[in-house]
Image (tube, rainbow, N blue to C red):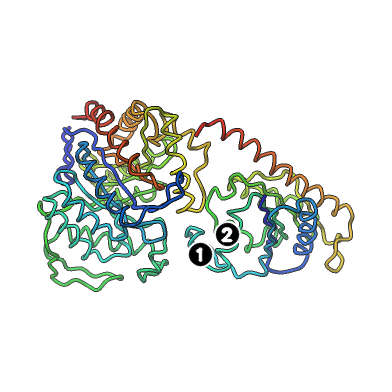
Amino acid sequence: MKIVILSGSKVGSKTRTAMDYTEKEVRKQYPDSDIIFIDLADYNIEFSDGRNFLEYEGDTFFVAKHLMDADTIIIGTPIFQASIPGALKNIFDLLPEGAFRDKVISVLVTAGSPKHYLIPSQQLIPILSYMKAEVVKTYVFIEERDFLRKEIINDDVLFRIERLVEDTGVLTKTYAQIRAEKEEAYGF
Amino acid sequence: MIIEMEKYRINKNNGLEFGIYTLGDHIKNPATNKRISAQQRLNEIIELAKLSEQAGLDFFSVGESHQEYFTTQAHSVVLGAIAQATEKIKIGSSSTIISTSDPVRVYEDFSTLDLISDGRAEIIAGRASRVGLFDLLGYDLKDYEELFEEKFELLLKINEEKIVNWEGNFRAPLKNAEVLPRPVHGSLPIWRAVGGPPASAIKAGFQGVPMFLAILGGPASSFKYSIDAYREALKRSGRNPENFPVSTAGFFYAAETTQQAQREAYPHVDLGMRSINGHGYPKQQFAQGADPRDVMNIGSPQEIIEKILYQHELFGHQRYIAQVDFGGVPFDQLMKNIDLIGNEILPAIKKYTSGK
């Protein structure tokens, strides 16, 4: 299982903190997996100009290629101006239409206000579905008060991350099995 | 109704024209994990054109792609060799990327090809689905749309006018320029390559040029929108759609049974897509491709005949060209396909479409 943990913001620390916890949990639950952590803050990524992802170079190609090769992607996103950051949307724009076909994707959200709770389901999940991802139904929504100086201080959040990582792995395996059976039946 | 397509060398009495096209892709054979040399691939493409002629096919074309996994970058040179190796079959490009070429040089090449082949050469001009060639050949991707439109229009002008006066943004002006040599019949059939959504088909219609439509997979009814939009644009620009041929181009693979065709073709199509586009061909969609309503002509000869006739009824097109060699298909399998086309598929297609 090739897992990409994607922290989808250029600024701030909360999403990165949440994804650090998530990475630890992923390594604990799936120690034999091929795991890569990509924090968009560490990369210089070009804006999409419509070309095929194979034709980008440097960081842009590196990130796009890892996402295309993944079986599983765990996306962390803050909420900026009542939406996902442009940096994260650009990642989706870099990839082909059906880029997430046969991939399981789960989501963690950090937000300054509980009023933003529905934003991922209205703005992020539709993108992932359009790109053919199998999205893990529930996402982990983490608020300002759950953090203190780059640590998560709410045990409930930690439990939710644990469950999200478990569900993500279970669904990846389940879909892979179902797909293998179905593809076997095609006979080609 | 008289269909006046002589300018494009289309005669309705011949029925639906059937051709082969290759992108000149150079990909390993997934069954052996080995890739033949570029030299062998080029020679096999020329051989494939000869076999296509012997099997009675109407058209053979070669495309240019300037990137890894391809070998016919100099497609007009390959077509020169094919012109010399054949006698009757029409030959063309599929496609020529006019955006990153000089239309004068392209016209010189293809009218020369027309003279060598005794009036068999055609140009299909496209915009490129990949953009690496913009860097390679020194063009700015920002000009993607305009480069095509300007250069394609110049190419059409050179075809129509013996003495050309022209000014544009992407090439030095032409003053009383005579572009030589001239083709056998005075002009060349020049088509616009169109893929995907109707936007490009509409442009072809307003431009008043014949259209080559790529239809790789999906329901035939979806592609009919583009064809209808094309003909509507022709009408709206004061032209008669009866004078403008439409051609389709798509995946093809024939074997004794549909199951066998799918089994043999899938690994190639999947690896080809994976190599060139970075993701494979979904099995579920490939399986659906066997449905008679889908444009993917992969199946038994009988099923392919039915599909092509269904598409012909729906589209009313004049030519279909098949891509049989995508993704490292070994030559013996290509020969078998040409045999099945020549012996079983082509006679039926001609029988049912001649005079229509």
Number of labels in the image equals 2
Q: Quadrant of residue B292?
A: top left
Q: Considering only vertical position in the picture, is A168 above or below A116?
A: above
Image-based side of B245 in relation to B225, left or right:
left
Percent position of residue A67, x then y? 61, 56
Residue B212: x and y in percent read 30, 46
Residue for badge 1 = A56
Q: Is residue B314 above or below residue A50?
A: above
- Mark before the other along the chain sequence, 1 or 2: 1
Residue topped by disc 2: A64
Q: Secondary structure at mark 2?
A: helix
Foreground residue among B92 and A178? A178
For mark 1, name the chain: A
The image quarter containing residue B344 is: top left
Chain letter for mark 2, please.
Answer: A
The picture quadrant where one finds residue B215 is top left
Residue flagged by tag 2: what amino acid is it? Answer: Ala
Out of A143 and A43, give the one closest to the viewer: A43
- Tell me the SS state at disc 1: loop
Residue B281 horizontal side relative to residue B202, left or right: right
How many angstroms separate mark 1 from mark 2 (CA)?
Answer: 9 Å
Assess disc 1: are there few (<14), some (14-19) or many (≥20) residues with their C-alpha within 10 Å of its C-alpha.
some
Label 2 packing within 10 angstroms: few (<14), some (14-19), many (20+): many
Q: Nearer the viewer, residue A176 or B132?
A: A176
